[in-house]
């Protein structure tokens, strides 16, 4: 009878790459928070009357009219170089968003604003996650809640007649404007 030493188990896929050392992880996550914020924090701050930042919606006019964060400034990403100087105070930090995680328009807008000297964060999840959380959106008609359940079907904007899925953006629009 022979005794064999048990072989060490292979690391799980989660630990195939070892976690960073605590000091490196702290530096990474602190830096990440300097670049991003989430919809819950933006909503909480706005609901409390925060005035220490401005929210910028970088989507097209059609998308803006379908619904945007109340109080946001409409500044499509492509218009930032021409219009940011008139619409934004460089001393006030900017939180920018676009459709959602599948769109990098918010990232492009943040880059354009940073290149112009603005301090900027991107709102993770964009308008998609704002709606998923059940927060109000503003349209030309005023404030309203959009259905967050994709099973409720598309939203038809009563002002523009355009059809939009509240979670994925305008149906049939080839370019969201960002």
Image (cartoon, grey):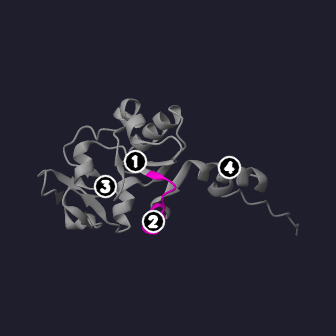
Residue topped by disc 4: 28
| Figure quadrant of the N terminus | bottom right
Q: Residues within 10 Å of mark 4 (few under 14, many from 20)?
A: few
Distance, label 4 to label 1, CA atoms, is 26 Å
Q: Tell me the tag on residue 49.
A: 2
- Asked if residue 83 lies left or right of residue 14, the reply is left
> Can I make out residue 19 in this image?
no
* Residue 164 magenta-highlighted: no
Q: In the displayed structure, would residue 109 be above or below residue 96?
A: above
- Asked if residue 95 lies left or right of residue 147, the reply is right
Q: Nearer the viewer, mark 4 or mark 1?
A: 1
Q: Earlier in the sequence, mark 3 or mark 2?
A: 2
Whole-percent x, y for residue 50 in the image: 48, 62
Q: Residue at x 38, y 51 (%)?
A: 100
Residue topped by disc 3: 68
Tell me which segment is drawn in magenta.
Answer: 42-54
- Tell me, yes or no, whether the two marked residues, 4 and 3, touch with CB atoms within 8 Å: no
Distance, label 2 to label 1, CA atoms, is 16 Å
Q: Residue at x 27, y 59 (%)?
A: 138
């Amino acid at each position: 009878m022979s005794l064999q030493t048990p072989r060490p188990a292979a690391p799980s896929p989660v630990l195939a790459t070892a976690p960073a050392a605590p000091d490196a992880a702290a530096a990474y996550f602190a830096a990440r928070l300097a670049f991003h914020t989430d919809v819950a924090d933006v909503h909480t701050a706005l609901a409390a009357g925060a005035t220490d930042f401005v929210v910028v919606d970088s989507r097209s006019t059609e998308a803006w009219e379908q619904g945007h964060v109340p109080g946001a400034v409409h500044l499509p990403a492509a218009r930032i170089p021409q219009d940011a100087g008139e619409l934004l105070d460089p001393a006030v930090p900017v939180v920018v968003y676009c459709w959602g995680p599948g769109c990098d328009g918010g990232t492009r807008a943040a880059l354009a604003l940073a290149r112009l000297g603005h301090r900027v964060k991107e709102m993770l999840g964009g308008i998609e996650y704002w709606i998923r959380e059940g927060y109000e959106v503003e349209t030309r008609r005023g404030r309203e809640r959009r259905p967050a359940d994709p099973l409720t079907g598309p939203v038809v904007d009563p002002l523009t007649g355009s059809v939009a899925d509240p979670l994925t953006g305008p149906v049939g629009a080839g370019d969201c404007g960002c």
